[in-house]
Each structure stands twice: as structure tokens, then as C-alpha cells.
Amino acid sequence: FRLLVCSTCAPLSLALALPHMEHFTLPYYYQFGSCLFLALLLHVVLRAKKTRPRLPPGPWQLPIIGSLHHLLRGLPHRTMRDLSLRHGPLMQLRVCERVAIVVSSAEAVREIYKGNEANFSERLSSPGIDELSRHGQGIIFAPYGDHWRFLRRILMTELLSARRVEAFWRIREEEAARLVSSLQAMSDGRLVNIDKRLDEFMTDSAVRAIFGDRLPDRVAFMKNVKQGVDLSSLFDLRDLFPSSRLVRLLPRNGGKAERHRQEMFRLMDNILRSHEERRAARDGDDEQDMVDVLLRIQKEGNMRVALTDGVIRALLIVSSHGLETRTFQLLSNTRCINFHKSE
């Protein structure tokens, strides 16, 4: 239709044209809405037909944070116990972008690891752990592969062998005797800080087992080890939103991780240098501690995986904290003490 507008007949022409325009435009909106509805319906149908992995049940989730609000109701281990009693031995938890499967029964654990151990051998790392272990990676967070198997073989055949464990027991006996002697010398009515004495006992036992002697700056070393554990366990948004570029730009701990790594590497370099000088003086014989064993393996160099100084540092730091923690648990648990006595 053509619309002719003039000064005398404009109102009549517009009045005649309006019904035709309404008749022309309304079907257009109907067609657009129908196409949009069909597109949404097709998307829903295709999404429903798409095969998805059958994930275990879990608590209801909120946008963005997932199941995080459930873990904030109390202690995390008690909260997960209550949730597992409600949802079963296999439970799915999504915390922001991280998805985890919580296993709370021995039967489920056996079923998972039966023939699938390699799929679950790798521990999930985090930006905080990667920042603290930038120049070396221990066995805890190492990816499953040749490097992990090499470090595991060193631990089982060299560092934690029967002969080495027996040597650790003798060290603990000597340190325990020294602790008792120091307490007897203070039995003149003075107040004694038992926590401090036990902390010194655990520190000296761990340090002697790893480094072969009491360190002159043992307090600084163990303080840095504990600080590293605290830094690695701090809450970090980058752990919850690993794909977010904005979150990765946020500062972490005001540079504490970088300062801790530099201080720990300085202490470890001094220890490694003193052991290398001592080994050179005695031609590499008479191994006494973990550092000597690792330096010997590094010098041989006939392994598929290189044992760098950074890896040695990471192994020694993990061993330091592990030995001290085991000694503390042994002292604080009467049932464990009786069990070891019976053995």
C-alpha cells in the first residue's frame, strides 16, 4: 500500500492506513516470539539428551558459592559427617568452582581404589602451594608420574627404610634422656615450662634425624617450617576461583609467601653447603642423616628424574614437619604409646 499525504486529506489518509499497518506489524512480533520459543525449546531438548556423568548426591547449592554455606555452620569435619549421614557415603560438594567427592565409608574407599588407584593418586594443588614451592616440589603435591614414583621410591627404600627408622628411634631415646636430665636439674622448686621443653624435644628429634645434628638456628628453622604450613592452609580466593583473572590479580598475604620462601631457602642452602663440605672431607662415606642420602643420590645422577636442590629442599621441609607432627601425636596419645611399646 502506498500512502499519499496532502494538506486536505491527511487525516483521512492516516485513518485509512492505520488498520493496514496494524495488520502488517502484529504477525511480525508473533513470528519473532515463535522463533525464540522454538530455539529455547530446542536448547532444552538437546541439553536433556546430552549424556552427563552420574554424580553422587549432595546438599543443595547456591549460585557462585555452591555448597560453601553448609560448611560454615560449624567445624568442617563435623559438618561433613552430618551431611554424609544425610546424603550417603558418597557425597558431592561444590565449593565455588571446585567440585569434590566426599567418601565416608571403608567399603566406598575400597571400591574406588580397587583398580583405580592411579586415577586418585594425584593431589589437587593450589596457587598458594605453587607459590610456596616454586623452586621445588615435594612428594605431597607432585603430579602422579615418573617424578612422583621416583620420590616415593627414595622415601621407602632410603629415607624410611628399616635401618633408618631404627636410627631415628635411637635419636629419640637420646633426646628423651636429655629431656629428663634437664628436668631433673630443675627440680629445686622452680617453675618449668613443660610445653617449651617438649617443643624443644620434638624439634631436636626431627632436626637430628634429618640433618644429623642440632642446628645452631633450629628455632628459626622450625619457625619457618610452621609458618609455611600456616601460609599454605590460609584461605585464598584463588583456590576457590582458579579460572578468574580478576581474582588472580589480587595480592596474597602482603608478600609473606615470597619472604618466607627466601628465608627458608637461605637456611636450607646453609645446611646443604655444610653437608657438602663435610662429605667432601670424609669422601662421601659414613652417611648419618637424610641430607647425606639425598646428596649421594644427587651426585650419582643415574636416575631418570633429576634430583635438584629445589626438590631436596622440599623433601627436607616436608620431612621436618612430618617428623615433628608424628612425635607430638605420639606423646599426646596414650593409646599410640602403648601400641608402640607392644611392638
Image (tube, rainbow, N blue to C red):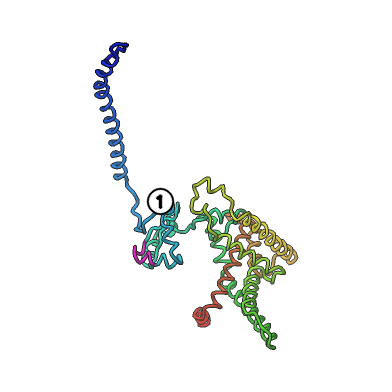
Q: Quadrant of residue 332 in the image? A: bottom right
Q: At 59% from the left edge and 75% from the top edge, which residue is drawn? A: 166
Number of marks in picture: 1
333 in relation to 215, above or below: below
Instruction: Locate residue 335, reporting x and y percent.
Output: 49, 80
Instruction: Locate residue 40, reporting x and y percent.
Output: 31, 39
Instruction: Locate residue 80, reporting x and y percent.
Output: 41, 64
Of 224 and 297, the residue lying toward us: 224
Q: Quadrant of residue 330 in the image? A: bottom right
Q: Quadrant of residue 43 in the image? A: top left
Residue 31 in the magenta stretch? The answer is: no
Q: At 61% from the left edge and 65% from the top edge, which residue is drawn? A: 226
Locate residue 265 relative to residue 305 in the image: left or right. Answer: right
Query: SS of the residue at dot 1?
Result: loop
CA neighbours of label 1 inside 10 A, class few (<14), some (14 to 19), many (20+): few
Q: At 54% from the left edge and 62% from the top edge, which residue is drawn? A: 152
Residue 85 in the magenta stretch? The answer is: yes
Of 79 and 321, the residue lying toward us: 79
Residue linked to disc 1: 63
Which stretch is magenta? 82-90
Q: At 65% from the left edge and 72% from the top edge, which residue is drawn? A: 208
Locate residue 300 relative to residue 35 in the image: left or right. Answer: right
The type of residue carrying mark 1 is Pro
Instruction: Locate residue 82, reporting x and y percent.
Output: 38, 67
